[in-house]
Amino acid sequence: MPASGPPADPETTALPTPELIETTPSRGLSQSFRALRHRNYQLFIGGQIVSLSGTWMQTVAQSWLVYRLTHSELLLGTAWFCSQICVFVLGPLGGLAADRFSRYKLVIATQTLMMLQAFALAALTLSGRVQVWHVLSLAVVLGAINAFDIPGRQSLLIQMTSKEDLLSAISLNSAVFNSARGVGPAMAGLLVAAVGEGVCFLLNGISFLAVIGCLLAMKLPPFVRQKQDSPWNHLKEGFRYAWHHKAVRRLLTVLATASLATAPFLVLAPFFADQIFHRGSKGLGFLMAAMGVGAVVGTVGLARRTHVHGLPGVVAWCAFVLGIANLGFAVSPHFYLSLAITPLIGYGLMRQLAAANTTIQTSIPDEYRGRTMALYSMTVVGLAPFGSLAAGALADRFGPRVTVAMGGVLALAASAAFSWTLRRDRVAR
């Protein structure tokens, strides 16, 4: 159906029934990995395993570099703001591109540009000429690329697999993302302490060769451009559809709240590792790795599901877990207790994202997928910079512990509000 055609009525578009993505009755661990029966998805995951480890190395090394150069909580927040604000500002254009052009070629282009950004940051750092404004400027560049990469990559998942295996594909993608969150930060902590941040940036640039090579090896049907409205009308139509789709609107709202609630922990982790627990860059790496372990446990378990029934309840429960974990981390007096709490943050956040992503993608037609995934990226990633700036400013005024506790309270409020809407709908039916 051309994107210019009449949209389905989103108010009457219900969440998909369990039968919609029912699969074969296999059980056990193999059910979690059923998306790997698709060759294109095998290639994609193989490249992601290498590339995402490098990406997490760069993320942690960049935070530590800014902290080392400035020792400022506010500038830590500013660095996160710069790396993500373009996802919010340019996200609509990224979604439009994903629905009007070849998603496959779009992702190859964005991954190549990310590689060049990493090499530029490595060159400046290894040469000893890096300054804070260099880091912030290149963070803005990376954010602009991500604004197109995220909706393109999320929309491409269904083309690599099938609607029946979409839940498995999204969950495994999240598991790989967070496995890399476990490996990358730990490696970054050791490498930063041994040879400095520049080597992390260089290795990240090299890691993109793996995912680009795997993308080029894929065999996908040729892209056929359909007759479409003007870009402006196409953009308005897609966002109008998402806004009037009640289930999608609610899920995006709770994800936006979770993004803001988690920002204090992510932004202030270097401060906790160094100033509060006196563990330096290694401590930061271990905290981020522990978060990744929890996320992998949550998302691999989710991949075993064969239907979407009950996923909105998973979203509400995970928001509750996220709130309790943030409050626990805020008051924890010891590093090892904090290290034990951190996996719950990863579990709650990433299991929630995977559940919401799957629910959204299985309840919308493909012609709106790119623009809807752009809204997803704007809420999950694009709002994070506002949370980052707020976290830095609040920590500067009230201290890091109070700021992280505020995030926990916000997550609990989101859980309560979303649970109430689910119960109200069940009563209404």
Image (cartoon, rainbow, N blue to C red):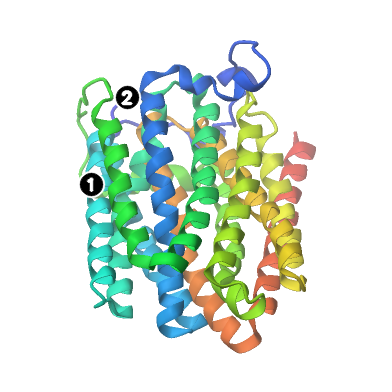
Q: What residue type is labelled 1?
A: Thr
Instruction: Name the quadrant containing residue 397.
Output: bottom right
Q: Which amino acid does label 2 sit on?
A: Met
Looking at the rendering, in which quadrant would you find the C terminus? top right
Task: Name the residue beneath numbered marker 1.
Answer: 112
Location of residue 426 in the rendering, given as x and y in whole percent from the top left corner: 76, 37
Instruction: Name the quadrant containing residue 11.
Output: top right
Q: Which residue is drawn at 40% across and 63% down?
A: 84
Location of residue 407 in the rendering, given as x and y in whole percent from the top left corner: 66, 68
Q: Residue at x 67, y 58 (%)?
A: 342
Looking at the rendering, in which quadrant would you find the N terminus? top left
How crowded pointer 1 is (Cα within 10 Å; few <14, some 14-19, many 20+) is rated as some
Point out the tag, 1 or 2, that comes first from the N-terminus. Answer: 2
Location of residue 47 in the rendering, given as x and y in whole percent from the top left corner: 36, 36
Q: Nearer the viewer, residue 372 or 2?
A: 372
Q: Which residue is drawn at 65% across and 11% down?
A: 25
Residue 362 in view of the camera: yes
Task: Name the residue beneath numbered marker 2.
Answer: 1
Instruction: Say whether residue 366 is left or right of residue 341.
Output: left
